[in-house]
Image: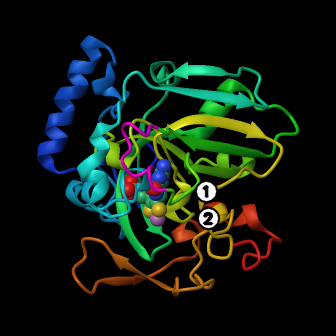
Amino acid sequence: MRRNWNGKLTEKDVTPESVYLNRRNLIAGAGVAGLGLAGLGLGSMGGSPAEAAPQGLKPNSFEDITNYNNYYEFGTGKEDPARYADALTLAPWSVTIDGMVDKPGTYGLEDILKGKQIEERIYRLRCVEAWSMVIPWNGFELASLLKEVGVQSGAKYVAFETALRPDEMRGVSRRVLDWPYREGLRLDEAMHPLTLLATGVYGRDLLGQNGAPLRLVVPWKYGFKSIKSIVRITVQKEQPFTSWKDANHREYGFYSNVNPEVSHPRWSQATERVIGGGLRSRRETDMFNGYGEEVAHLYKGLDLKANY
Ligand SMILES: Nc1nc2c(c(=O)[nH]1)N[C@H]1C(S)=C(S)[C@@H](COP(=O)(O)O)O[C@H]1N2
Ligand SMILES: [Mo]
């Protein structure tokens, strides 16, 4: 039921006891009441025996994950999202899925989540700014949604767009990026089983600062590819417009695969600061952020220096 990549932890290994017990209660409640908004992060997670041992992926605290964020629509400081992102109205939420799909439309989030298997996935998040943390996400594979809407032949890319709400997002009055925040993946990257649409963290609904109610997680790419608070998904032929590449194409490419051998023009990517690991805690950055076994084949024959 639950597949935990790169670490094989079960939820019981990583969840603080109090949260874990609380979650059991929530699940019991959800079974009776059905899945309302309060169940978004949970879905149909069931129990399972905790057999596997941690293998170097020790999740950060809920505190770290929800207080050290990048979400420029709410300000460029790491603490701004925690302070201001609760202004974002999360319900009702809908996502427009269009372009080269058989069933285009604007779908309510409840509709999208119906029948989805919500899994826990413990992934390292490596920001292009050379810091990282480990996050136990809850979510489902993007591929399952794309299969549902039916990708048409000839499609090559998937484009994503974040909500743009000047009344709720105090950071968008400054034109730091060409809003709305936009990202994109090649279709094969989007269909890869590691690529997640997240709805929760530590078994709780996503908070605004983490991209509630629905955000992308692509663990082998720099964090900025993992676009938050998605309102549009477009399947298309052309490589999508992506906000960071548009802002500075010398520093940020379309692929943005984590690569310790390709430096950012202004800093090395060989190592990363471990958030929550103490003042001087660093680790060596892994190729593809440690997911090479799963994804390296996607880039066979591609010059990863030129295609940064
Ligand atoms: N819409 C939007 N998505 C975004 C960002 C942003 O500023 N706006 N920041 C990105 C960056 S740079 C990172 S590192 C991750 C951080 O995710 P987290 O705050 O949930 O850890 O979100 C990414 N997604
Ligand atoms: Mo980032």
Residue under the point 67% across and 44% down:
159
Q: Secondary structure at mark 2?
A: helix
Residue placed most toward the observer, 120 or 60 = 60
Q: Is residue 184 visible?
A: yes
Main SS, magenta region, reads: loop
Q: Quadrant of the C terminus?
A: bottom right
Q: Would residue 215 be counted in the magenta stretch? A: no
What residue span does the magenta drawing correspond to?
165-174
Residue under the point 80% across and 46% down:
156
Residue contact at pointers 1 and 2, CB within 8 angstroms: yes
* Outermost left residue: 18
Residue under the point 24% across and 71% down:
276
Among the 4 quarters of the image, the one containing residue 204: top left
Q: Is mark 2 within 8 Å of ligand 1?
A: no
Coloration mode? rainbow
Q: Quadrant of the N terminus?
A: top left
**The disc label shown at residue 247, or none:** 2
- Mark 1 to mark 2 CA distance (whole Å): 6 Å
Instruction: Residue under label 1, please give it.
Output: 243
Q: Would residue 172 be counted in the magenta stretch? A: yes
At which x and y percent is residue 212? 38, 39
Q: Residues within 10 Å of mark 2 (few under 14, many from 20)?
A: few
Task: Name above or below for residue 219 compared with residue 159.
Answer: below
Residue under the point 65% across and 29% down:
97
